[in-house]
Image: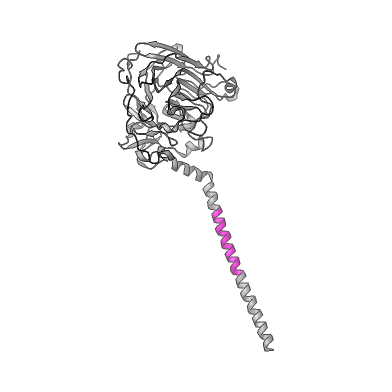
Amino acid sequence: PEQGAGRQKGWGGGVSERGGAMSAARVVACLLAAVICLSCGAVAAARSPEARMHRHLKRLNKPAVKSIESPDGDIIDCVHISHQPAFDHPFLKNHTIQMRPSYHPEGLYDESKANVASSGDGERPMVQLWHRNGRCAPGTVPVRRTKKDDLMRASSMRRYGRKHKPTVANPMSVDLAMLNEGGHQHAISYVQGEKYYGAKATINVWEPKIEQPNEFSLSQLWILGGSFGEDLNSIEAGWQVSPDLYGDNNTRLFTYWTSDAYQATGCYNILCSGFVQINNEVAMGASIFPISGYSGSQYDISILIWKDPKEGHWWMQFGKEYVLGYWPSFLFSYLADSASMIEWGGEVVNSQAEGVHTSTQMGSGHFPEEGFGKSSYFKNIQVVDSTNNLKAPHGLGTFTEQSNCYDVQNGNNGDWGTYFYYGGPGRSANCQ
């Protein structure tokens, strides 16, 4: 009997221990499940569009020494020169910033004639709107802050700050199918057939009207290398109105670069690593002020891009005194040597909403034949040759896909050197 009782007791004790073990296992399983759920939740949260957007903004917007609110709503962050977006590039991790070009092009400062406009107004000094509320100190660079709304307007975060290809005028080919699908349209002057080491122009500044938010209008110069295929190298600078990129219709200074025909490399301004800015006074993407008026005061900006013959970098100068910075030569394949084509002129996006041509304006929105004060111009256009000299372009051609929508006319005189008027209204009785 005692043995039986002992067995019974032992059996009962076994049941109790096993039950406790099972309960503990269930608790552990529940805790593991909770941890896994929390981990899944954390991963899901990290992968959420909101979190991805926050990370992207953090990458774009570097810590500011000082921030300035512009009258147009922009925020300009004064970022330490060594913390700017350029240094996110793996090839620039140990890069020593070149604070000045080794050489300027010869003939750059012999411009007494270039500063006299036909109206007698002369060239007026251009400023950016944010200067009204402050300046960035030496040792910092002004960076236009990217906001959440900017990213939300983009077709994707990956494509934010990038052009949609194709976007360079190819004078050798007019692709009518592209026009019918709502492509890019141009009115340009161009040169090719030599090796070019830079280009310069003084560009009349306007505020063209944009019909659709996904369209833009710009006036710029292109430094091109390679073919019009998948390997095109391009450096670009000028002014643009782009509601999609900036969220308003202001005229803004901009730059662009690509080494693979706008596919995976390059961007506007400093929205990716690449361009190294050294100037503390001019912000890429910031509003230009003042703007020309029809039959009123005329304003223009001068832009020079050239290849430093010693270091090989491509430098940009804005106006007579603002050397903005450079595109390191390693960013490019063809342009690591020289450019094979230079273009100057206007470009618009024609999205053909509702099956008709856009009414987005190019330049002033008026045709070249209207002339000074009414049509937009490029004047004193020059190229940099192999001896680092600025000279007038030889064999200048013109190109436009639809001259009834946007046109271009070259000219030459003493004060303006080589020049052209360009632009147009887009949709009209003659442009459908």
216 vs 372: above or below: below
Please name the predominant secondary structure of the magenta segment in the image. helix
Q: Position of residue 378 (x, y in %)?
A: 41, 18
Task: Specify whether 295 is left or right of 23.
Answer: left
Count how many numbered circles sit on residues in the image. 0
Q: Where is residue 17 in the image (x, y as percent from the top left)?
A: 61, 75
Q: Residue 250 sits in which quadrant?
A: top left
Q: Residue 284 sits in which quadrant?
A: top left
Which residue is farthest bottom? Answer: 1
Q: Position of residue 194 (x, y in %)?
A: 44, 18
Q: Quadrant of the C terminus?
A: top right
Task: Name the foreground residue: 31 vs 426.
Answer: 31
65 vs 258: above or below: below
* Residue 50 lies within the magenta run: no
411 vs 138: above or below: above
Q: Can residue 374 be seen in this view?
A: no
Q: Where is residue 356 in the image (x, y as percent from the top left)?
A: 58, 21
Report the magenta residues as a range: 23-40
Q: Is residue 62 visible?
A: yes
Residue at image point 53% right, 43% down:
49
Task: Specify whether 22 is left or right of 392.
Answer: right
* Residue 24 lies within the magenta run: yes
Task: Name the foreground residue: 76 vs 402.
Answer: 402
Q: In which quarter of the image is the N terminus?
A: bottom right
